[in-house]
């Protein structure tokens, strides 16, 4: 006799990481012990991104069309609306490629989770924390390289505040520095995982309560699936926007 | 049973793999994608900017040419009107002169004709006088040569008058 359907297990099976890659209609593929499904998705996403940018994108097109137009739209938007307004003209030009890499990297990993064969690598806290740590390194390391310890001091403690308030301000700013990066990691992780939980929950309802529940639950799952496409795009955009704002604040403290 | 990670379980290899792949992505895309894409975009933006500036310049030049054309057209029109007016004046003057000359000629012809008529009349009158005198003389000679009666004299005179 088969075990009763467990919705919680069904959801966790879809969003959690494991050493088994489930492909519909095929037997699960057992991955080696140094490679989990999310790691595999990370590698596949990376290869896909490199192929997209190096092979599919047509640089020689004088009038861009199709995928070239799509990619250029985001590149121009990231450069003109996110990076340059937050980091200035000169530094913005230098940092644009890195932020474009962040954006497309996160976007590809986010969208891969919506394809049934693949899984959401950005629904793994280790990956989002790793990305946030890179932003933290850029914030702190970049500020130290640009202005030395005094530059870091000015970035954390704005000039002109009363002397007695400096220690409190310093503690708050250092705390905020970490909180911002943790928030970056948590936001991306939570949003990606939440969408998938909702979709799998609705699909699980179809299995749990049968056809009559499915009549209502399945269209809802489709609606959330469509919304999730937008969320994938939005979360990649928000990660890059907030990163640019945080790094810009550290490099050019205005307070 | 498959080993499954909890949502917040740490996976060190994941972080290391992420950094390795992400730095690989940054390096490769920086060299082969973003640099050419951004350069291409800048080139296209410059080209569009230059094309728009050229279009504005050409538009301004065209407006200048249009203004110059309109000015030349106005000047030509003005000049043509002047020439027409001048021609009309010259024509009127010429017509007036021709008319005056014609009148003068006609008057001269009339005067000349009058003079000729007068001269002819004078000449005829003189000839008539001369003829009358000769007739009178010949008549007197006849009267004197022939001694005629009064009735005869009267007939003779009448005959002489009729002959004249």
Image: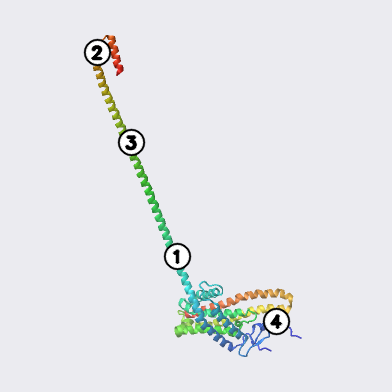
User: What residue is shown with label 4?
Assistant: A7
Q: Nearer the viewer, residue A136 or A199?
A: A199
Q: Nearer the viewer, residue B99 or B62?
A: B99
Q: CA distance from mark 4 to mark 2?
A: 185 Å
- Who comes first in sequence, dot 1 or dot 3? 1
Q: CA distance from mark 3 to mark 2?
A: 57 Å
In the rendered view, tell whether residue B156 sits above or below residue A48: above
Helix, strand or loop under label 2: helix
Q: Are marks 1 and 3 in contact (CB under 8 Å)?
A: no
Q: Are marks 4 and 2 in contact (CB under 8 Å)?
A: no
Tag count in the figure?
4
Helix, strand or loop under label 4: helix
Q: Residues within 10 Å of mark 1 (few under 14, many from 20)?
A: few
Q: CA distance from mark 1 to mark 3?
A: 69 Å
Q: Same chain, marks 3 and 4?
A: no
Q: Quadrant of residue B140?
A: top left
Q: Nearer the viewer, residue B29 or B130?
A: B130
Q: Are marks 3 and 2 in contact (CB under 8 Å)?
A: no
The residue marked by circle 4 belongs to what chain? A
Question: Where's residue B71, x and y in %?
Answer: 40, 56
User: What residue is shown with label 1?
Assistant: B56
The residue marked by circle 3 belongs to what chain? B
Q: Same chain, marks 2 and 1?
A: yes
Helix, strand or loop under label 3: helix
Q: CA distance from mark 2 to mark 1?
A: 126 Å
Q: Same chain, marks 4 and 2?
A: no
Disc number lying in front (3 or 4)? 3
Helix, strand or loop under label 1: helix
User: What residue is shown with label 3?
Assistant: B103
Mark drawn on residue B143? 2
Q: CA distance from mark 1 to mark 4?
A: 66 Å
């Amino acid at each position: 006799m088969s075990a009763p359907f467990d919705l919680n297990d069904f959801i966790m099976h879809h969003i959690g990481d494991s050493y088994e890659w489930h492909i519909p209609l095929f037997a699960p593929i057992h991955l080696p012990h140094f490679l989990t499904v999310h790691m595999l998705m990370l590698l596949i996403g990376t290869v896909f991104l490199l192929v997209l940018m190096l092979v599919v994108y047509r640089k020689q097109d004088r009038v861009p069309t199709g995928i070239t137009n799509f990619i250029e739209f985001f590149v121009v938007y990231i450069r003109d609306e996110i990076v340059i307004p937050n980091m200035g003209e000169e530094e913005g030009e230098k940092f644009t490629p890195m932020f474009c890499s962040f954006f497309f990297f996160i976007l590809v990993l986010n969208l891969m989770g919506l394809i049934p064969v693949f899984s959401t690598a950005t629904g793994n806290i280790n990956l989002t924390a790793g990305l946030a740590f890179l932003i933290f390194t850029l914030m702190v390391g970049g500020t130290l390289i640009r202005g030395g310890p005094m530059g870091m001091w000015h970035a954390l403690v704005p000039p002109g505040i009363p002397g007695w308030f400096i220690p409190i301000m310093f503690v708050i700013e250092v705390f905020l520095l970490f909180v911002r990066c943790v928030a970056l990691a948590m936001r991306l992780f939570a949003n990606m995982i939440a969408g998938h939980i909702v979709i799998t929950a609705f699909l699980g309802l179809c299995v749990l309560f049968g056809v009559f529940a499915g009549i209502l639950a399945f269209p809802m799952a489709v609606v959330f699936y469509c919304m999730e496409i937008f969320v994938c795009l939005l979360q990649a955009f928000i990660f890059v926007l907030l990163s640019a704002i945080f790094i810009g604040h550290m490099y050019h403290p205005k307070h | 049973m498959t080993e499954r990670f909890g949502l917040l379980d740490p996976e060190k290899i994941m972080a290391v793999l992420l950094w390795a792949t992400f730095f690989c992505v940054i390096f490769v895309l920086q060299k082969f994608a973003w640099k050419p894409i951004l350069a291409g975009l800048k080139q296209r933006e410059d080209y569009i900017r230059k094309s728009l500036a050229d279009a504005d310049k050409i538009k301004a030049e065209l407006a200048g040419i249009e203004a110059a054309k309109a000015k030349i057209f106005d000047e030509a029109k003005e000049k043509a009107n002047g020439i027409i007016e001048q021609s009309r004046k010259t024509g009127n003057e010429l017509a007036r002169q021709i008319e005056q000359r014609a009148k003068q000629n006609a008057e001269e012809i009339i005067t000349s004709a009058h003079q000729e008529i007068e001269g002819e009349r004078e000449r005829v009158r003189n000839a008539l006088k001369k003829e009358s005198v000769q007739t009178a003389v010949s008549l007197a000679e006849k009267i004197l040569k022939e001694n005629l009666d009064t009735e005869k004299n009267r007939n003779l005179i009448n005959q002489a008058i009729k002959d004249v």
